[in-house]
Image (cartoon, rainbow, N blue to C red):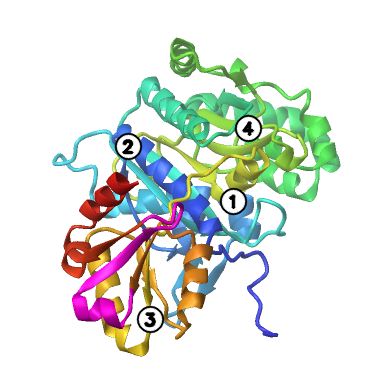
Amino acid sequence: MSSYQKPKGTADILPGETAKWHFVEETARQIFHDYRFQEIRTPLFEDYHVFSRSSGDTSDIVTKEMYDFHDKGDRHIALRPEGTAGVVRAYVENKLYGPEYVKPEKVYYMGPMYRYERPQSGRQREFHQIGVEAFGAESPAQDVEVIAMAMQLLNTLGVKNLKLVINTLGDKESRQAYQQALVEFLRPHFDELSADSQTRLEKNPLRVLDSKDEHDQEIVTDAPSILDYLDEKSQQHFDTVQSLLKDLNIDFVIDPDMVRGLDYYNHTIFEIMTDSKAFGGKMTTILAGGRYNGLVEQLGGPDTPGIGFGMGVERLMLVMDAEDVKVPVDDDLEVYVVGIGAETNATTLEMVQALRKEGVSADRDYLDRKAKGQFKTANRLNAEYVITIGQDEMTNRVANVKIMATGKQVQVPFEQIAQHFEQVQQQLKEAE
């Protein structure tokens, strides 16, 4: 038994299970394509400050969860804990805001992320995200397009009982006015707050609303609401988002206490939740995002509005398993070539290669099994057809092709099998 084990908080995604991942990824690719989002791929690691600057020095990601280190050139490097910051860095560095690019610039990504946190169901240290970002449009309609696409993706993947929760953080001025009111409310409770919230009160008071500490949650129950501090422009943006969601018949709930965990959000933020039995029937977020006007500028680019979302794939998989979502698996074997005698080795190899070039899935024996063992293997692999080649077949350049389900078989010249297998299939159907 091997003494080597995977690192804590990681998982092996084995053959069979990967078929589900392909289904999710290809479904996402197709839907994103329909909405005119294109794929972007960024490095797994970035300069530490890409994340500390964008996510905020007080966020849990930066203060507790980042995998960071100094490399051999003494550069401070971090494994990416989320997708947005790296995409924004790429957008700025490659000048995707230039006049030659059509706006909005709409991109998607998928891949592994890393956070050092306590592993639990649906939450690993190496986890995978699928996400989108749209740059250059300030319109509330862009917010709604991103939300609608997220809902369509989850519906298409078979996730049931979805609940869309939205809120707004307003623009910079609204947020500052609300932040001041929140500080005035929380200051008298300073000694009662958790250590984390005491730190956040000094650096980013809105994050106190996001505290997981039960006593903190009790304190903020009576806190003022961001919705009471929106200026006219922010209120109009949020009203339009609600109106457009209703126009698209997308149900939603407003939660004024939702702030999201990263510092770069403003205006519309949202979470899509489900009460799947995968999490004991408790409402759990499986996709979340929001607008982040100002983040591009923060990372050195021009003032550019943006909005996006991220979805945890492992968490989604748990929900799909609990909902017993049937995933189409395309691993059918069409042809198994049986070779009788060592002298058929080269011919059977040539045959499977010719079939594969025709786009036919084909396999043969590589363990020197007897003919009986090869037929058993063809059965186990659920091969649709078996082609048998022995000494006589090699002499006459004709092989037996059998339909495994019915036992019907015909003799067919090697050349026809190798070049026109679809004709052989038709011939067998007519012989039935």
Depth check, front residue: 177 or 366 = 366
**The disc labelled 2 sits on which kind of residue?**
Thr
Q: Which mark is residue 304?
A: 2
Where does the magenta region start and end?
A: 389-408
Horizontal and vertical percent for residue 179?
61, 30
Tell me which corner region of the image, top left, top right, bottom left or bottom right, holds residue 159: top right
List the residue tagged with mark 3. 340
Q: Amino acid at mark 4?
A: Met
List the residue tagged with mark 4: 273
Rounded to the nearest angstrom, the CA distance separating label 3 from label 4 is 58 Å
Point out residue 286 in the picture as x, y percentages from the top left corner.
60, 39
Whether the magenta-drawn stretch holds residue 161 is answered as no
Give the secondary structure at mark 2. loop
- Note whether residue 82 is visible: no
Q: Residue 314 shows which numbered tag?
A: 1
Please give the name of the residue rendered at 64% of the width and 52% of the height, measured from the top-left corner: 60
Between disc 1 and disc 4, whose residue precedes?
A: 4
Give the side of residue 18 with respect to residue 58, left or right: left
Nearer-N-terminus badge (3/2): 2
Residue 228 in the image, given as x and y percentages of width and height: 61, 16
Comes first in the chain, label 1 or label 3: 1
Per the model, the C-alpha gap separating discs 3 and 2 is: 68 Å
User: From mark 1 to mark 3, how far is it between C-alphas?
Assistant: 46 Å
The amino acid sitting under disc 1 is: Glu
* Label total for image: 4
Tell me if residue 204 comes above or below residue 349 in the rendering. above
